[in-house]
Structures are given as C-alpha cells and as structure tokens.
Amino acid sequence: MALIDGTLIVLAVVLFFGLVVPEFFRRFQLPFATSLIIVGSILGPFGLKYVEINESLNMFGFLGASFLLLLAGFEVKHIHFTTPLLSLTRMTFFNSVIPFMTGLVIVKTMGYSWQASIFTGLIFIASAPTLIMSTIKMLGLERTKIGQAAESISIFEDFISLFLLTLLFKESSLASRFSTPIYLGLLISSVIILKMFLPEITKYFFRLERKNKHDDELEVRTIISLLLIILIIYSGLGIHPIIASFLVGFTLAELKKSEVLKKKLHIMGYGIFVPTFFFIVGMEIDLKTVLNFDFSNIMMLLIIFGLFLSKFISGFLSSKLEHFSNRDAAIFGSLSMSKLTTALSLTFAAVSFGIIDNALMTSIVIMSVISTVLSPTMTAFFSRKRIKNVD
C-alpha cells in the first residue's frame, strides 16, 4: 500500500527531490531529468511503493510533457545552414533510416505488433536537440561545422519522427475517422495556417502588453491561453496534444521575443510540471524488468545496444560520406545517440494510446537514461582527441 497518495503531498515530494536530488547526482554528471527518473523508479509502485500515480498527478505529467515539446519547438530557429542543405539532408536520411530499421526489426522479432515496432523505430530516429546543444556548447563545438550540422540534424530528426508519429497515432485516436490523405491535408494546412496567423496574433497581444506596462506577464499568459485553445482544436482533429505543443513552439520560434518567451516558459514548466513528468516516467519503470533475466530483459538489452550501435554507425558513416574527418564523424555519431525529452514525451503518449506495454516502455526509458550519460561522455572523449589533432 502506498504511503503517499495525496496529490499535494506527492507534488511536495516531487518538488523536494527536484531541488535536492539533482544537486547530489550532479557529482556523478547525471542530468536533471535522469536523476528524477531514477528517484521516481525507486519510490514508485514498482519500487518501494511509497508513491502512487493518480489522475491529478497524471495531469501534471501531461502538462510537463507538453511544456517539453513546446520548448523543443522553439529550437527550430537554431538550424544552421553553414553546411549545404543537400549534405544535411543526406546525413539526416542515413542517420534516420538505419536506426529506424534497427528498432523496427528488434521489436517485431520480439513478437510485438507492427504499430509498436514502427513506434520504436521512430523513437530511434528522434533525437535530443536540447541535450545535444548543451553538450556542443560545453565542449566549445558550437562554431565548428560538425557541431552546427549536429544541431540542425537533431532538429530535422525530431521533426521527422514527430510528423510520422502523428500519422501512427492516427489509428489510435479520433482521427481514425478520417482517411489518411484527408488527415494529412488537415495536418499540413493547419500548420500553414498556424505559421501564417499565430505569430501575428501573438504580436498583437504583445503590443497590448507594451501599452500596459504594469502587466509584465501578459506575454506568458497569452502563449499559455493560445496553447490551450490550439490543443483543444487539435484534440478535436485527433492529434495528440503533446505533438500539438511542438507545433505551437515551432510556429512561434521566429518571433523576435522568442528567446525571452522561451526563458519564461522554461521557468514555469521546470518549476513544477516538467519535474513531475520525469518523476512519473520513473514511476512507470518496472524495476523487476531490470533485475530479472527474462524476455523483457533480453529485449531491453537489444534495444539499448541496437540504438547505440545503429546511431553511432549511421552517424559516423553519414559524416564520412560528406568528407568529415574520422574524429568529427565519431563526434557526430556520439551526439546522435542522445535521447531524452522527445523520446520520453512520445513514449508517454504511446502508453496512453495503448500502443506499447510496460516492458517496452521501460526499455525505451532506460535506453534514454543511459544515453544522457553515454552520449556526452563519448562526445567529450572524441572532442579532446579532435583538439589534440588540431594542436
């Protein structure tokens, strides 16, 4: 029986650990998200059973996932074209197709449905632009061609995986009443309409904010209000709200004040919603899967090694095809292995649709957690080698 079941008490526990635990785990170079996932898995129903998930907590987790993809949409403005577009396209293609086929084959071989197998393949495509950008900045690679190419490609891959997952989720949502061509037309036309009108609507409210100097938070309230309205509209079309959040961020990325907005939304989201989401993801992990050597354990190992090998090899080969050095190719391969916000948010959505079971979800979450440590570590190793060669 859970010792803690009141929503407010659970939130207090999450926020407490959100403040204290990341500081402790930082000594071991573990990211904020990873540390909260670990704590959630220990305290959750599959661990010590101190905390249980309820509807209110699930709502906070849903808002956290929405905030993560809203902020991910803002990253589109970081696409660089110092590397020719054709080269970026080729690198994105090879760094997507090979991992996609790897994930699909592994999960299908383990007896899962085509829908679950395709979902896993698309998760193998998805990247972690925020983590990649922070790693590149930390290692001083932001002005290098391979660093800028990696940032751009990570955003392209996220966009591709989100678009294709929208089509995959179609059969499990209200959108199943539409034929695929009509659904595609609705989706593409809605994005075009958003791109045309949402920035203008936002600018109008920002002009009101300048007139009302006493209301400093009107900008954030405007974005949140528009986000909720758009989520309701997209839900009517059968598009998962988490994916709709990304589209809102994408359409607002080119606003002049987008960086200021992003910082304010980051503070709001990471204040309560995002920590709760990561904690809930951890609570969903079945620790028995990790400790017992059985079918689920074998699948987890295949998924983990399949992702890292397919991403590193495809990243290395695609870079070599564009005449990058061995060190730069290894750096790109290492960065490509990153998984975090997009993978976890979409896994959260897939569970809600019943596309994947707990064993597969646990495998994807653990794969993502390991990638947050392994990818930056390998990138740092090859980056030091690169600097020595330059010297």
Image: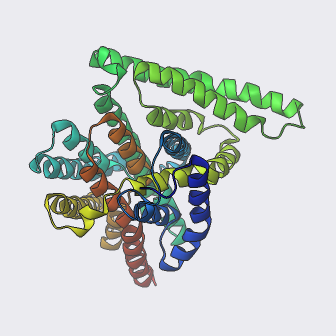
Which of the 4 image quadrants contains residue 195?
top right
Please name the residue shown 18% across and 61% down the image: 302
Given residues 176 and 161, the one toward you in this image is 176
Q: Position of residue 75 (x, y in %)?
A: 53, 47
Given residues 280 and 335, the one toward you in this image is 280
Q: Position of residue 176 (x, y in %)?
A: 30, 19
Q: In this view, does 246 lie to the left or right of 358?
A: right
Numbered marks: total: 0
Q: Position of residue 22 (x, y in %)?
A: 55, 69
Is residue 85 visible in the rendered structure shown here?
Answer: no
Q: Is residue 169 left or right of residue 142?
A: left
Is residue 133 visible in the rendered structure shown here?
Answer: yes
Instruction: Examine the rendered structure and indicate whether residue 348 appears above or below residue 385.
Output: above
Q: Where is residue 363 in the image (x, y as percent from the top left)?
A: 27, 57
Instruction: Examine the rendered structure and indicate whether residue 344 appears above or below residue 210.
Output: below
Which of the 4 image quadrants contains residue 16?
bottom right
Instruction: Examine the rendered structure and indicate whether residue 168 appears above or below residue 73.
Output: above
Which colour style is shown? rainbow
Q: Which residue lies furthest to the front in this view?
A: 1
Given residues 1 and 23, the one toward you in this image is 1
Please name the residue shown 56% across and 54% down the image: 10
Q: In this view, does 192 lie to the left or right of 124?
A: right
Q: Quarter of the image containing the N terminus?
A: bottom left
